[in-house]
Amino acid sequence: MTRKTGISVLAACVVFFTGSVTAIAGPLEDRVKSGQPIRIGFSNVPIYAFPDDKGQAKGFANVIALGILKDMGITNVETTVTDWGGLIPGLQANRYDIVTGGMSILGSRCKNVSFSDPIAKAGDGLLVPKGNPKGIHNYKDILNKQAMFVTYSGANLVEAARKEGVADDQIMQVPGPSEVLAAVKSGRVDVGGMTYFEVKSMADASHGELEATNPADLPEWTQNWVGLAFRSEDEDFLARFNASLKKYIGSPEMIGAVKEYGYSEANLPGPTTTQWVCANR
């Protein structure tokens, strides 16, 4: 199967909905057995998970999730786009069954949801104006230079900045990546923070107006693993999902499907377990 064919087959499996989804009670295994669709929620986060102009679910997190479900024999899927900050609450409220959105596995999140085995390894990055006029390369620079930092609400970078001593009045939180980009481009902030996938993509598309700093300049502990989030009561389904994930992650089919998003073999999660990440991030 070619990459283009693989993407089109996966995309054809998705029925895209905007607006609210009626909550239906019952564990995910029961929904599948009764023929009800699996409901996927994600935010508009370039590279990771986003809708294209035809409403199809794109991004490597969506492609991986759909590929695993397809291998499990599941193609009855609905997707919903919402603000980043509404993903976990929506999952807990039974509006979605799986959250894809490129969500880093964090100890604070592990208290509220059950994550799949990791699907990717990805560090954070900083987005700055051309020439990096304030010389910002890490959180200590933001703190010491009294710079204004923007990221999106609920992102792991909020916790990271606070851990490095950045004050709340130096942190602007916005709904999503497009608002981060707009704040940096307009000069309302000195630096934006997202995953390195996102900042590199935005810098490359800015025609030299913006730059991505070196992710190696950030603390080692900001290296993160991405997972897919499930409700804790769906552990039985999650166990089956993880069994298929182990076969799919790193396969030629998967690498071909995600190549267009900049995901390479360097981003494979390796042997790191979700339990370790929950305890150490």
Image (cartoon, helix red, strand yellow):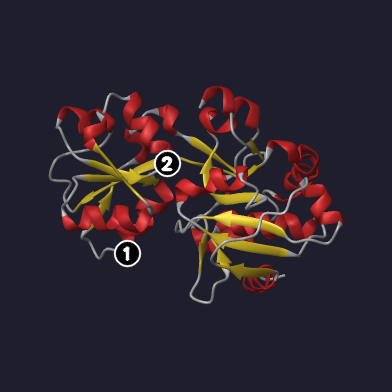
Residue 14 to residue 221: above or below: below
Helix, strand or loop status at disc 2? loop
| One can see residue 271 in this view | yes
Helix, strand or loop status at disc 1? loop
Q: Nearer the viewer, residue 281 or 196?
A: 281
Q: Left or right: 128 with respect to 65?
A: left
| Cα–Cα span, label 2 and label 1 | 22 Å
- Residue at horizontal 26%, vertical 58%? 182
Answer few, some or many: residues within 10 Å of disc 1's Cα (few below 14, many 20 plus, some between 14 and 19).
Answer: few
Image coords of residue 11 (percent x, y): 64, 70
Answer few, some or many: residues within 10 Å of disc 2's Cα (few below 14, many 20 plus, some between 14 and 19).
Answer: many
Task: Tell me the quarter of the image containing the N terminus.
Answer: bottom right
Q: Left or right: 228 with respect to 69?
A: left
Which residue is tagged 2?
155
- Residue at horizontal 76%, vertical 46%? 241
Circle 2: residue type: Ala
Q: How many marks?
A: 2
Whether label 2 touches label 1, CB < 8 Å? no
Which residue is tagged 1?
205
Q: Which mark is residue 100?
A: none
Circle 1: residue type: Ala
Image coords of residue 177 (percent x, y): 37, 54
Q: Nearer the viewer, residue 100 or 214?
A: 100
Q: Residue furthest right?
A: 33
| One can see residue 266 in this view | no
Quadrant assignment, res 168: top left
Given this view, does label 2 or label 1 mark the residue nearer the observer? 2
Q: Residue furthest bottom?
A: 54
**Sequence-wise, which precedes: disc 2 or disc 1?**
2
Image coords of residue 218 (percent x, y): 34, 33
